[in-house]
Amino acid sequence: MAAAGYVAPDARSRLFVAVLLPSAIRAELTRATAALRALEGVRPVRREQLHLTLRFIGEVDRGLEAPLARAISAATGGLRRFPIRLRAAGVFPSHRRARVLWVGVEEAPPLSALRRSVEEAVVGVGVAPDRRPFRPHVTVGRIRRPRPPVGLAGAIAGVRFEATVDVRHVSLMRSELLSSGARHTEVAACRLAGGADDARRARR
């Protein structure tokens, strides 16, 4: 029998770093995008999984979870909490080739600084740098077919949503791809506000 805390050498984790949204904001966001998420061919993101991704890490050895949590906590622990504003809706990469439906997050210097700190921490642990531009957004659905759904432009224009969220923590998340859909688990939460490092470990 393996000892407590043992990690099999071939164990892998699919990880990302995110700002999690309060339940009330997730509920409001779900209501505001209901028509968009209900379009034929759209696979909506479940309410409990709505979040702002700061850095998608991808699949790594499970043993890197703890070093990543420590590095992210150390890199972000000196940053002050700040608000972000969510508003409007759109698609990636374009209306004609729409694959991802999102609600936007306005770019701001504190958010850019947080993203840079997270990126430096992740790369410092040995993960390859992310060369893609950072486009802050909350994914609300994905399109599963080649053609965009009928009524997509109207549904996007009809989204009326604005909210402000206080960023107080950054979370290292594990994503498991199951037959029933993705399951997200918080590995560690790293507190902002310029205080001491107080990452808390979640269930493993």
Image: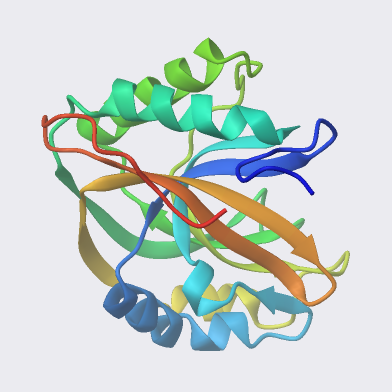
Residue 19: give x, y in percent of width and height.
37, 50
Query: Is 193 in front, or is 148?
Result: 193
Residue at (41, 22) in percent of width and height: 71
The type of colouring in the image is rainbow
Residue closest to the eye, 84 or 146: 84
Please report the residue visible at 79 percent of the width from the left and 37 percent of the height from the top.
8
Within the image, what quadrant is residue 136 found in? top left
Q: How many marks?
A: 0
Q: Is residue 79 above or below residue 160?
A: above
Q: Is residue 193 visible?
A: yes
Q: Name the image quarter holding residue 43.
A: bottom right
Name the foreground residue: 32 vs 165. Answer: 165
Q: Position of residue 11 (x, y in %)?
A: 79, 39
Task: For residue 161, say whether it is visible.
Answer: no
40 relative position to 80: left or right: right
Left/right placement of residue 191 relative to residue 172 reads: left
**Residue 199, image x and y in percent?**
32, 39
| Residue at the image position 44 percent from the left and 15 percent from the top | 120
Residue 62 lies left or right of residue 67; in this view the side is right
Quarter holding residue 113: top left
Image location (x, y in percent) of residue 85: 24, 55
- In the displayed structure, would residue 47 be above or below residue 65? below
**Residue visible at 75% across and 71% down in the picture:** 181
